[in-house]
Image: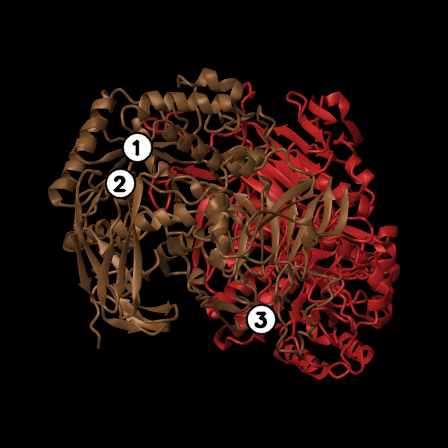
Chain colours: A brown, B red
Amino acid sequence: MAVQNRTLLPSQWMETHRGVWRINAGEEQAFTPLGFLGIPPKTDAIAGMDEAAFPFAERSPVLDRAGASGTVIRFPLERDERVYGFGLHFRRLNHRNQVMQLQVDHYGGRDDGRTHASFPFYVTSRGYGVLLNTAKVVTVDVGTSVRRDDPKPPPVRDRNMDRAWDSQPPANSIEFNVPASGVEVIVFGGNQPLDAVRRYNLYCGGGFLPPRWGLGFWHRVPTLYSDEQVEAEVNEFRERGFPLDVVGLEPGWHSKSYPCTFEWDEGRFPNPSAFVKRMDELGVRVNLWENPYVSPESGLYETMEPLSGSHTVWGGLVPDFTMPEAREALSDHRRQEHVVIGVSGYKLDEVDGYDKWLWPHHATFPSGRSGEEMRQTYGIQLQKLTSDLYRTVNRRTYGLVRGSYIGASSLPYALYSDAYDHKTFITALCNCGFSGLLWSPEVRSGADADDWMRRMQTVCFSPMAMLNAWASKTKPWDFPHIADAVRDAMLLRMRFLPYLYSAFARYREDGTPPFRAMPLEGVEGESVADGTLDDTANPYASRAVIERADQYLMGDSVLVAPLFRGETTREVAFPDGAWFDFYTGKHVSHGGVQQVSAPLERIPLFVRDGGIIPLMPEMEHIPKADRNVPLEVRAYGTKDGVFRLYDDDGETFDFERGDCSWTTLRTVGGNGEIEAADRYWFYDPSRFEWKRMTDDA
Amino acid sequence: MAVQNRTLLPSQWMETHRGVWRINAGEEQAFTPLGFLGIPPKTDAIAGMDEAAFPFAERSPVLDRAGASGTVIRFPLERDERVYGFGLHFRRLNHRNQVMQLQVDHYGGRDDGRTHASFPFYVTSRGYGVLLNTAKVVTVDVGTSVRRDDPKPPPVRDRNMDRAWDSQPPANSIEFNVPASGVEVIVFGGNQPLDAVRRYNLYCGGGFLPPRWGLGFWHRVPTLYSDEQVEAEVNEFRERGFPLDVVGLEPGWHSKSYPCTFEWDEGRFPNPSAFVKRMDELGVRVNLWENPYVSPESGLYETMEPLSGSHTVWGGLVPDFTMPEAREALSDHRRQEHVVIGVSGYKLDEVDGYDKWLWPHHATFPSGRSGEEMRQTYGIQLQKLTSDLYRTVNRRTYGLVRGSYIGASSLPYALYSDAYDHKTFITALCNCGFSGLLWSPEVRSGADADDWMRRMQTVCFSPMAMLNAWASKTKPWDFPHIADAVRDAMLLRMRFLPYLYSAFARYREDGTPPFRAMPLEGVEGESVADGTLDDTANPYASRAVIERADQYLMGDSVLVAPLFRGETTREVAFPDGAWFDFYTGKHVSHGGVQQVSAPLERIPLFVRDGGIIPLMPEMEHIPKADRNVPLEVRAYGTKDGVFRLYDDDGETFDFERGDCSWTTLRTVGGNGEIEAADRYWFYDPSRFEWKRMTDDA
């Protein structure tokens, strides 16, 4: 064994960026996710952050061992420390007291570590984060394994007589088991959890800025629709006044799918170029569904054959996209067949699992990468490929991906899943914000009008507002008596565009996630109750934990508290300070937990004291950059506030060369002030109108 | 890499026993489960079995690789081959089309490989079995991973248009991924699945023969009962006429528990020796609950400290029982404190999981065994220890254990779980028979009288008939209006003793499991229906599979088809031939699927044509060997039949030296004949009375 029981002293860590430290624990791995992505950290933005102390100055991490039998490394935890992150999870925020095998796979209904995006990065309530830059399946014991040599072990109790006995005595460390002879560790400092998240995002290249149209409404048509059927459906959106920015084509656009040809079906889409153009004229972008497995009938097959793994998926090749030749082959094909005719992006399906559909961990690949490394990183491989491709034509893209991994912050994708539980969708949305991910709680169908309405509301206050009717064929207006209310929710989404787009611009600029779970806003919101002993349902009297995992912040000022089927009232945990109803401006809370209610047609939205919300008019799609959009600038509460409004062309990467602007909207003593920018692409500041939402009383 | 892509030709396998072949694929592992157990195969019994051809004569297994990156080995599967085994599983019999990580852990509600007894041994519908003798966590792809170099891959289909598209194209091999540089493989031949199961059991030392009293009724008392309370409860059984053979003491007998002292609590049990003696006088044995983690307040602590692992469980030591010193320390203590005063055995709890309670895989142990190897084998370590201990005093034991592994066939334990679903309990019972395990579907409580009755019936037709009231405090008579029916079910269990004990004697003698799933009786009983595509509930139109996993054979002639809460009718799949109602002798079926019904007070039981069932009188406990027990010998159907009735002292291992006898009960042309043995311990053949159950008509 190469290394054993080595304390990783503060002096041994290298501060690579302000508040970011790294160390190689044991041998360097030949392949790492961040190494593969090769995205440079946003060094200047990190340098602009508040100073942060090295979080392990007092208690050092310990490299228990590194060698042929794997790498075991542990980091200290305080007794009351909460642990968030590890990617996309569905049922809880705080992973303390859990063991997880962090494996990219379909989500199977349990937060056991197997999910569409699962990886060794965590942030804690003490404000720092830890990343293990590895593509191996890591097992993590989050404060569960108590070592015999622990100088401060939890007390030993007698279960016979001591009611304080706990089935899980808390350990004061988090232990990682990495099946490799070493691992690179990166620590992100901070004074609060959000700092660590921001540092992680900036280290991974910053958040991404979607094209402006990506924040409009999306609709995926039934799988075998022809160009004419798609066009008719888009026209129906327009005729009925339902907004639509992106139409998604499902597998039927391919001549064959599962595995895919990546070639247009000549029967359903005889003239793809003309079709995409007609869509564009209606203000609608085209997104294409794909899975990455190459059909023997695809023109790409021959090229990909020597560049693919030992196993097949549905009889299709599994290209090794860590190899430049494989990336180029798919990129060239996409560029010629899709990108140049105007296709806006992709839905990258099936990159994650199930185990029983994809290749095994023991599969081999021509680059020498293991099946395990490929399974963990296939999602980011495909994201990077598409992201790079659109960059070559100076057009931004925004798409969907079902699997992701370390380093995805700057990749323009939202996650989704075939799971379909409304409440766990919200928890997924909350969790993504800890780990540089975004979640789309897509709507597919509703059990009834009530369910449909509540799901549509949630989707309209999410990173990607999408109806995916590939199989259900549901239209937004399919429940007639609430059709108007559904349209109103979609139009409200459109009105929020200036607010949302600015939040994404901040994501890019300083790493602040546009959608944030409550612990990132200071609401740990967790109470612990004793479980009742029951010999069949709860034989260990496990404790019940209440988290605030069904509400979240959108941007800096809006608290979203979705209601669920059959509900018109719920509990909301407010961060400190005064909060106001978005719709009426009325004061609702001084912070803390409170019951709120809302009729079926409204999703509860609350605005922070001093919150400024710029709303654009209701529109059927996001207009192009040459339109001068007016704004209603709403001011809530009585405190002074500031909002920074972002503008650019909405489509290209020219903003990276400085072609963008920030406008400061400010309230001072109840009056609205505008610090206009030098240049606008979308807005006309002379048409900004302040609206005071809250009376002084 | 040491080995790559090596075909394991028939000539390279060594036939170690008739129809048993072995090979070392790659390097030998330092520690193996069978090596640790050191139980010699029953060579003569294997030699007495029918000849069996090497199952891979036509298509050889392939050692894909063996070396530092692990061992990958694959075995051929035919397209229609079904795959059973892999230990204890709860939801299906045939594991074809699954990927499982075979890890000993609590059962979490999914057959994903994590369960109380999970290991790489399978038998197939073609009649052979394969064992990988390893204590590592193995991943198995059961016909799921299709290789690119497969000469006969499944057809590639187009999901757009081809309705025969399958989300899981069947692979024609089973692939194992073993995290070690080699693995010993043992193949068990046979002409039908039962042959392979028998060879496996005999190779592992044969099945075990419990003491006769072990097949009576068991009752576990509430956890903090004192000796007086236990005695009062036992007396109540006697007063009410409910049979009882074993009383189980739960954690409260220890002075401290979780972790345990292994020492009697002086308050609740001031005079253990006298208590055990009083129980014995009532015909009741005492069984002690334990978990293996050593409390700092135990007299064993100091001895165990240097013999324990790096991590603690509830603050207790985790002794390394692969070390003889640790085994001796616990055995000596048990012998002095428990065995010599008459304690009959143990319930070995918490040897399996959860992950978050036990030690991590990266824990270290003084013997050099990894945490992973220890987690996989802790159940058999504890079983072996107790089994060996009782052998030193020439007394048989029978107990409960929550975790088990490869090679457990000859260890005198039944498995159980904290799961509590009646139907999955039956599937667990069925599955155990494939892998040399036994399952106790213990009753803890009932949702209502109906549930209680149905669960009690199941338990009375299982390997261990037990009510575990440690927390619920339920008594068998707690639902007054069915109390008589419950007593009748328990008394019927007692009457079956001669039949059951003989079935266990065969388990020991020729490896035939006393409880068998339907595929071991030629009923694959599986039909496949197309799943209906649904975009939220079933987006891949996965197929529905119907198995006969809720019925089983007890011994050779009795088909048990339990009913569940609220049911009085069900479907039963009968093996070929005529079947008769146990209670009335009436003809029920000519084989095939049939609807049957039974009132609440009866569990449906069916007897094969020619079946002979020896029943003893209703008794309140199993009498000692000196009693001359009469028998009612029931004959069912019209075919000639044979039953071999086993007898011995019921308590010691003297039967191994020949102190036992077999009586042949035979029907010829409708007449009963008895071939008496030379010697009896329990029965009086002059008091055997034939009872013809079926009319000639």
Q: SS class of the residue under badge 2?
A: helix
Q: Please indicate whether residue A92 sits to the left or right of residue A595 in the image.
A: right
Residue A303 in percent (x, y) is at 47, 16
From the viewer's side, name the closer residue of B173 and A456: A456
Tag 1 and tag 2, C-beta contact below 8 Å: yes
Q: Amino acid at mark 1?
A: Ser
Label 1: few (<14), some (14–19) or many (≥20) C-alpha neighbours in 10 Å: many
User: Vertical placement of B420 versus A27: above or below?
Assistant: below
User: Vertical placement of B416 versus B277: above or below?
Assistant: above
Residue for badge 1: A344
Q: Is residue A651 visible?
A: yes
Q: Amino acid at mark 2?
A: Trp
Instruction: Give the residue drawn at x 22%, y 21%.
Output: A271
Q: In the rendering, which numbered label is found on residue A213?
A: 2
Q: Quadrant of residue A636?
A: bottom left
Residue for badge 3: B487
Q: Amino acid at mark 3?
A: Arg
Residue A26 in percent (x, y) is at 70, 42
Residue A119 in percent (x, y) is at 54, 46
Q: Are marks 2 and 3 on the same chain?
A: no
